[in-house]
Amino acid sequence: MNSHFFSDFSHVVFPKSCSVSLTGIKDTIITDCKKSEVWKVLILDPFTTKLLSSCCKMSDLMSEKITIVEDLFKSREPVPEMKAIYFMSPTAKCVDAFIADFKTKPKYKAAYVYFTDYCPDDLFNNMKMYCAKYIRVCKEINMSFMPQEAQVFTCDNPGAFQSIYSPKSQDKKKTLETLADQLVTLCATLDEYPGVRYKNNMVNAKALAELVDNKLAKHYELDDSGKKKDKTQAQLLIVERGIDPVSPILHELTYQAMAYDLIDIQNDTYKYKAKDAVYFILKINLAQMMKKMPAFRKQVTEKTIHLQLAEDCMQHFANNVEKLCKAEQDLAVGLDVEGVKVKDPMRTLLPVLLNPYSTHDKIRAVLLYIFSLNGTTDENLSKLIQHVKIEDEREFILNWKELGGPYHHIGIFFSRKPTRRDRSQDQTYNLSRWTPVIKDVMEDAVENKLDTTEWPHQSECPAAWNGSGAVSARQKHKASSQDDRRTGSRLIIFVVGGISYSEMRCAYEVTQAVKSCEVIIGSSHILTPTGLLNDIKALSKGPMETFTIEERSNA
């Protein structure tokens, strides 16, 4: 039995479409490359490596006379006869590494420097001081976000959760500033100048909205023709993770979410053991396949990976997830499969606590119970913690108070739950009845139904969004001269504190239903239930303290 590693799990299993990023890179880095016929070295930092790999293949780079791709922070052999392209973040660490390549003995003939974002003056001046005669190009391409899928982006910053929500955080302001800069580069890449709104009573959302709005105004103060850019038909909504505590901890039964929740996938890498059947399949009809063997082997390998991954997911589902899902859905929705109200959530929770499920799964069920009641008493909370046997790890539950939202005080009853859209007529599966709150927000936004008290305007919104004589975004409108590449509007939603796969899926569902409005969703990072619980527990730790949740039981 051989071991195989699928190193680009997310790209093949869940295809990405990053045409906007690829266009931006082609219009800058690649275009400049074409001006010279000599072969070049491409040097990347960890962030730009991820960014470039999300939208380019090595063959694309080879066709543009790029022959070597190197890591900025690793030891590299000098190639003094070649020119080097540096695609990097505008940080002191990156600039210092760049300067070191030229300060004493230059490693390359010349340097073409491209920053993902605005380079601070002090860093730029250091580069000029030591490397001016070697720099041929120095540009900022405004692309400091990470395209994940066609309508999903992240800021590639899981640490933002700790920085923003930990009461011991020392860099919250700096983190929000960085996120704001990244959101501005997203808008610039999309060529959008959106109106900005935020969820009321969410202090971090409000702070980020103010930062983004100010930075957008500065960025778009003057365009290339010397004129001030007007607002486009786009809206940016900023919310916090506290708007919906349920979605990221439910067992989700779609392929992508199940895989990341139930299977041990590290760094988008899925490890599995190939079965003998693979080699048998490769032998059949062998003569006819000889000419197509490379492509055939690739197809078989990809299909085998999917089959194995689906089999692994179904094994977990059959063992315990199926039984858990019914209880979870009843608690989350507040109704059973027959549509009857759950009058006593404790009766739904008890079978989960009494069965030999993993501690991790019991914690998730307890949280859903608490959320279903809109809170619980200190006495009841203590009993629940004893049932799950996490007396020494009660932070898994208690630290949710740091996220604010509807569970601000975990030991008392909360204020009433937000009103949800009526979905009683929607067709759903018995084990997938919950709809993420963010989908309500998306649908209300494109229908101009967001309450301005609940969703204040940080800045002026275009007419299509503020209701001043405008029709619903469900109705198509003529594209503006600024936006002749498409009909309709864009709704951009940013969730402070991470997004779940079910919330990502909502962006596609609403876009498909509305047609005239493209919904794009993003966050600092993508959540998995295990990752979120780890982050929640860590909120009470110091900046340098870390830990890992116990592995889930396979029983």
Image (spheres, rainbow, N blue to C red):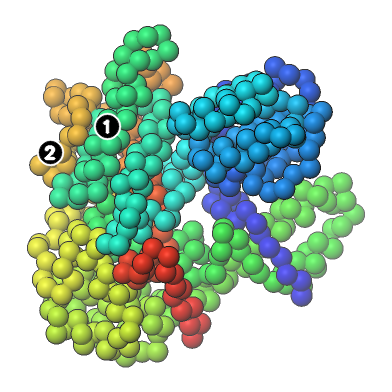
Quarter location, residue 392: bottom left
Relative depth, front residue between 421 and 454: 454
Q: Is mark 2 on a helix, strand or loop?
A: loop
Indicate the amino acid at tag 2: Thr
Indicate the amino acid at tag 1: Asp
Picture layout, residue 520 above or below residue 168: above
- Image coordinates of residue 458 in percent, x first then y, are 19, 34
Lateral position of residue 32 relative to residue 481, left or right:
right
Picture layout, residue 204 above or below residue 104: below
Quarter location, residue 362: bottom left
| Residue located at (82% from left, 28% from top) | 81
The quarter of the image holding the N terminus is bottom right
Q: Please rate how many residues cluster around mark 2, counting C-alpha atoms within 10 Å: few if below 14, some from 14 to 19, many from 20.
A: few
Relative depth, front residue between 125 and 413: 125
- Image coordinates of residue 139 in percent, x first then y, are 54, 24
- Image coordinates of residue 268 in percent, x first then y, are 57, 58
Q: Please rate how many residues cluster around mark 1, counting C-alpha atoms within 10 Å: few if below 14, some from 14 to 19, many from 20.
A: many
Lateral position of residue 302 relative to residue 507, left or right:
right
Picture layout, residue 426 above or below residue 225: below
Disc number for residue 213: 1
Distance CA(mark 2)–CA(mark 1): 17 Å
In the picture of the structure, the residue carrying the numbered disc 2 is 452
- Image coordinates of residue 99 in percent, x first then y, are 62, 35
Label 2 vs 1, first from the N-terminus: 1
| Residue located at (75% from left, 38% from top) | 68
